Image (cartoon, coloured by chain):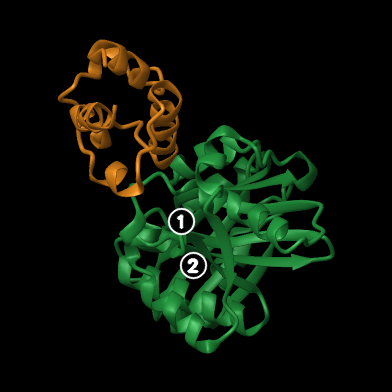
Chain colours: A green, B orange
Amino acid sequence: MNVLDCPWEIGNIGKKTVEISFLKDEKIDKNSIVEAIQGYDYMVAKVPSGNVNCLLGMQQLGFQVIECQLKISKKTKNFDYDSKLLKLLTKDFSCRVIDTEEGLFSVLNKMTSSMFTTDRVFLDEKLGPELGLNRYRNWISSEYKRGTVLFEYILNETAVGFGLLRIDNHVMDGILGGIYEKFQGQGLGILTAASAFLYIKQFDIPVKIMHTAISSNNMPVMDMYDYLGFKVDDIQYVLVKHNN
Amino acid sequence: MNVNEFLENFADLFDETDASEITAETEFRNLDEWSSLLALSTMSMIDEEYDIQLTADQMRNAQTVQDLIDIVNAKA
């Protein structure tokens, strides 16, 4: 069992937060957990799929399942840039790297809570959309400051969304992405899944594989990644508990 | 354009939704299965079958299947 104090969540959601994660074949030690979560307002637990002992044990301690997280991947060499649906969008598409504070603020200002309606903080009635949005804004800002690639999706010379991408040692992690509210409902969602590949193609960056994580609460996004041929590598249950 | 043929082409895009649920009056955004990927698939179908490229605004503003039929008819 790993216990992670998350002090950054005080700034994000105003709650003293702890995250507990388990290994695949670990047995639950309830006394250790009760001790570990003392003094926290908001507790998150991540249990690998198949570890029913920990899943049921955490529920007995009052934790509730809020989502499953699917870790998925796609090898770059297998990505189909010529897929029929993607080609509808990519002829007028480019990526614009955000490399100024002004650009960062512009992205943050265009973000709205409607972009993240399946996020577990958004969906949690004790937290909600505004805290969900605040958390994402803070997350993007801190990632940007540590050098994570932030870029906008440019379609017909208009910024329609953004992506956040970490590239290290020929491996990329798709951290976050979204279509701005004004451009939702137009079939652009596939860009959140495909833009990382379009980014490395545009800037000729050698990458072997992309990893990302999606929520079981977001079936449309799962459909998009399925269409693009991503493979599910791992699934974990996410449970939460509030004090008060 | 043959309306029944359009309805059939549109219904073919869905996996779970029964074709009988798709009529000209159907507000397709309210269908459980509707998604961004289906919006893009609709644009692709109209491009392939009718050689008409929907603009993003047209796709966004369309609410019923009849709205799509009207766009295709106007451009045909």
The verdict on a common chain for dots 2 and 1 is yes
**Secondary structure beneath label 2:** strand
- 2 or 1: tag closer to the N-terminus: 2
- The answer for which chain carries disc 1 is A
User: Are the residues flagged by discs 2 and 1 in contact, CB closer than 8 Å?
Assistant: yes
Let me know if residue A197 appears in the view.
Answer: yes
Residue at the extreme front: B76
Q: Which amino acid, mark 1?
A: Phe
Task: Name which residue lies at 33% across and 60% down.
Answer: A181
Q: Give residue B44's position: percent from left, percent from top.
A: 45, 31
Task: Name which residue lies at 39% across and 21% down.
Answer: B16
Q: Which residue is mark 1?
A: A63
Q: Give residue A99's position: percent from left, percent from top.
A: 60, 82
Q: Nearer the viewer, residue B45 or A91?
A: A91
Residue A80 in the image: above or below residue A104: above
**Secondary structure beneath label 1:** loop
Q: Nearer the viewer, residue A128 or A183?
A: A183
Task: Name which residue lies at 51% across and 36% down.
Answer: A223
In what quadrant of the picture does the N terminus of chain A appear?
bottom right
Alpha carbon separation for disc pair 2 and 1: 8 Å
Residue A32 in the image: above or below residue B18: below
Let me know if residue A39 appears in the view.
Answer: no
Whether residue A17 sits left or right of residue A73 in the image: it is left
Q: Give residue B70's position: percent from left, percent from top.
A: 20, 30
Q: Which residue is mark 2?
A: A43
Q: Which amino acid, mark 2?
A: Met
Total tally of numbered discs in the picture = 2
Q: Give residue A159's position: percent from left, percent from top.
A: 45, 65
Whether residue A76 sits left or right of residue A220 in the image: it is right
- The answer for which chain carries disc 2 is A
